[in-house]
Amino acid sequence: MSDGIIDKTAIELGTLLADGRVSSVEIMRAHIDRTRTVDDAVGAFISFDEQDALNQATASDERRRSGGALGPLDGIPVAIKDVLAVRGQPLGCASKMLKGFVSPYDAHVVERLRQQGAIVWGRLNMDEFAMGSSTENSAMRATSNPWDLERVPGGSSGGSAASVAALETPLALGSDTGGSVRQPASFCGVVGMKPTYGRISRYGLVAFASSLDQVGPVARSVDDVALLLGAVAGHDGRDSTSVEQVVPDYVHGDPPADRKWKLGVPREYFGAGIDPEVKAAVDRAIEFYSRTGCEVSEVSLPNTEYAVATYYIIATAEASSNLARYDGVRYGHRAAKAEDGVDLYFQSRAEGFGAEVKRRIILGTYVLSSGYYDAYYLRAQKVRTLIRRDFLNAFEKVDALLTPTSPVPAFRRGERTSDPLEMYLCDIYTIGANLAGIPGLSIPCGFTEGGLPIGMQILGRPFGEQEILSLGKQFEIGHEFTERRPDL
């Protein structure tokens, strides 16, 4: 039955568990077997502890036998990006800098998962310290796109998207600083969400850019994303940016079926640089909404042209500050040979960080330096306000925005590594949501002639996760894109 188990959604597995037709141990063994079979080729996991996962599954089965199931996630595996703390497990951020470091505590989202009986399953590969769009910056291993093993899975949450697409886990958590959940979801043909900033606690999420980072769910269906989002969302006093707001029932709380949606299409997201097959697929998706009674109109986000520059000033400045803590003294990599304390700091960071992380630290340090702060960082913050205002103005006219997730489908490994700017432009449609703090959902909306997935992004007003999930589910029901599987 293992082949049937790994192809089920989390909600379907929950139903099987509740009916007693399958055990959590059977579910976990099926996913362990699948991971053993395909992960040498896919490379989604950095590590996993089979016995620990089976022990959690056994405990879940014992709860069910005694009538004490903790909810719909009890006994369901959830894989974790290597940027989230799990007590007793490695926390390496796919970097030599943290190689061998073991987390002494659980992130808030992991606490939530444990409270609901979910199986915390393995460490997923990523771009080092979440800095990248292809998972090629990992210091641990290469991750491949399950649809074409010569291509990238996207990034930085490439392991999260690839593991779900390859049927190694039904659910995964990633992080999204500038599209790092949504872009790999698009590349790998799965569903991924960046919630509103403050909706999910960042406690236990290793910081890259603190004003942009958000934890986000990845799954093979919109309902599964809704289930995982509801499980981990909510206020946490240990994160000063966590918002005290009621968490809706994302799975069952759909708006009325007769609601007349007003949807906007930003003209700036369909200009030069978009792949023709991506544009055609998203255009067809927009036409679907028109045919089903939605009112679709063009809108403008006039400051979009400044988004990439603004993002890579703010994000790198915050990275420079956050990563200063890795000094070779308290924890992390420590250079074996150093002449004094200053040399220890220099040598440890030179050896521990990869090229992309160094590039961003240098850029961030520069824009924060004396004489350049006002010209770059302060100006970027002002433009960020204008970008957020663009979105809020658009949401006065429409309920949600429809855009491509990425301007291109998954590209070949090594194709863009020689030109950082070309790589950065892969995030052009996703970074606006992080700068504005709004939620975004990527859902599969088609395939290229070569069989590569294409994603459509649905952007919503602040704390409008329920609305964009409902719109995503409406599209998913009318199409079979989420039902297709890569041939591994």
Image (cartoon, grey):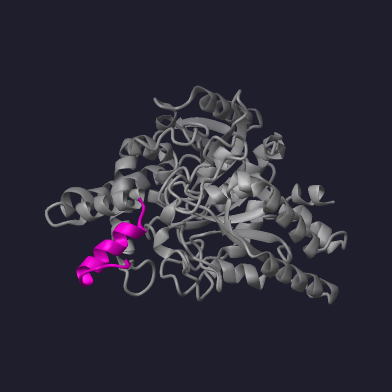
Image position of 354 (left or right of 256): left
Can residue 250 be seen?
A: no
Q: Is residue 454 magenta?
A: no
Rendered image quadrant of residue 394:
top left
Can residue 223 be seen?
A: yes
At 78% from the left and 53% from the top, the residue drawn is 12
> Of residues 14 and 104, which is closer to you in this image?
104
Q: Quick one: quadrant of the C terminus?
A: top right
At 55% from the left and 50% from the top, the residue drawn is 159
Q: What stretch is highlighted in magenta?
A: 335-354
How many numbered marks have been drawn onto this rendered protein structure?
0
In the rendered view, tell whether residue 193 sits above or below residue 485.
below
**x and y percentages locating residue 188 in the rendered image:** 59, 40
Image position of 343 (left or right of 93): left
**x and y percentages locating residue 41 in the rendered image:** 62, 44
Image position of 389 (left or right of 412): left
> Of residues 119 and 457, which is closer to you in this image?
119
**x and y percentages locating residue 261 in the rendered image:** 59, 39
In the rendered view, tell whether residue 486 sits above or below residue 449.
below
> Of residues 383 and 212, which is closer to you in this image?
212
Looking at the image, the residue that sits furthest to the left is 371
At 53% from the left and 55% from the top, the residue drawn is 174
Rendered image quadrant of residue 17:
bottom right
**x and y percentages locating residue 404 in the rendered image:** 50, 34
Rendered image quadrant of residue 332:
bottom left
Q: Does the magenta stretch mainly form a helix, a strand or a loop?
A: helix
